[in-house]
Image: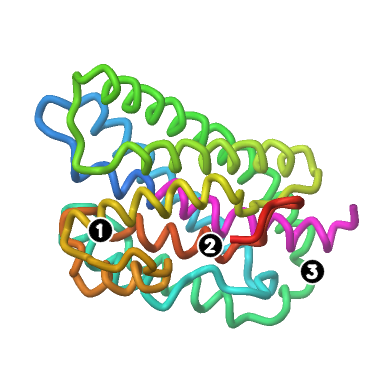
Amino acid sequence: MLREEYLEIAASVHIEGARWLRDGAAALLPCCTLFSCKTAFSLSRALTQGENLMDEAVALSGGLLHMGVLTKYTPVIEARMRLAGADLDAGITSRQQAAERVRTVPPGTRADVYEGFIALSRKAAVCAEELSSTLDDMVGAIKEGGVYSAVPLGAYEFLRKICADYAAASVRLAAGEDACLVRRADVYSAYKKCLMHAAAAQGVDNPNASADTLAALAAGGLIPGVPAVLFDLLLRYENLPRALGAEKN
């Protein structure tokens, strides 16, 4: 694979994948109670790691992003998450928006950017595996009845799967190989159904609502009992290219 191709692939994977990690931790952290100190510490660490990865990905990606991954609801939803108690860095999204407007990689920097993505991929693989392990523990505790959560179990399952996908992609990128993040039809369908049921429980009576509609309602504060960022995740996941052989959704 040509180095130029690798750089564009790595940028597209990390600009989305690192945000997955940060958003997943941000969705779950405010739901932790005083009896979940160990889990809260793990999620707080994952949130910090996710933002660090996001920051590095943005810094490396100028001139490499040909399609933005942010939605029109992302800034508002991030603001809602901060009100809910998630300590998110508002500056990262602004820097990402600026990076998406850059059209060329600065001359003479491609070698450094390449090495930067190799190092970032190694770190991302470890961080994604750590969050996956935390999610496994949380899912197990919920299923055993030892923990109650305001976040639907299906959302935990979704976050665990996308963390695994990001970890696998990062391992390949760390080895200088091709990788990608794709929308899996079954994962998307199950997650959307989960969030639609959660929205219905909050009074949203629209069984045919699109991911865009659900994200708009969450951004407007009309689904208050569910972390708003989960709906932005749904819409961003919908915007990924479909996996080969996947049925049309």
| Inter-mark Cα distance, 2 to 3 | 36 Å
| Inter-mark Cα distance, 1 to 2 | 18 Å
User: Residue drawn 45% across and 73% down?
Assistant: 71
**Disc 3 marks which amino acid?**
Gly
Instruction: Give the residue furthest to the left.
Output: 34
User: What range of the chain is rendered magenta?
Assistant: 1-22
User: Residue drawn 18% across and 69% down?
Assistant: 222
Residue holding disc 3:
108
**Disc 1 marks which amino acid?**
Ala
Report the front residue among 178 and 202.
202
**Rendering coords of residue 96 (x, y %):** 50, 70
> Main SS type for the magenta part?
helix
Q: Residue 213's quadrant in the figure?
A: bottom left
Report the front residue among 234 and 28.
234
Determine if the magenta segment contains residue 12.
Answer: yes
Q: Tell whether label 2 touches label 1 (CB within 8 Å).
A: no
State the mark number for residue 238: 2
Residue holding disc 1:
199
Determine if the magenta segment contains residue 181.
Answer: no
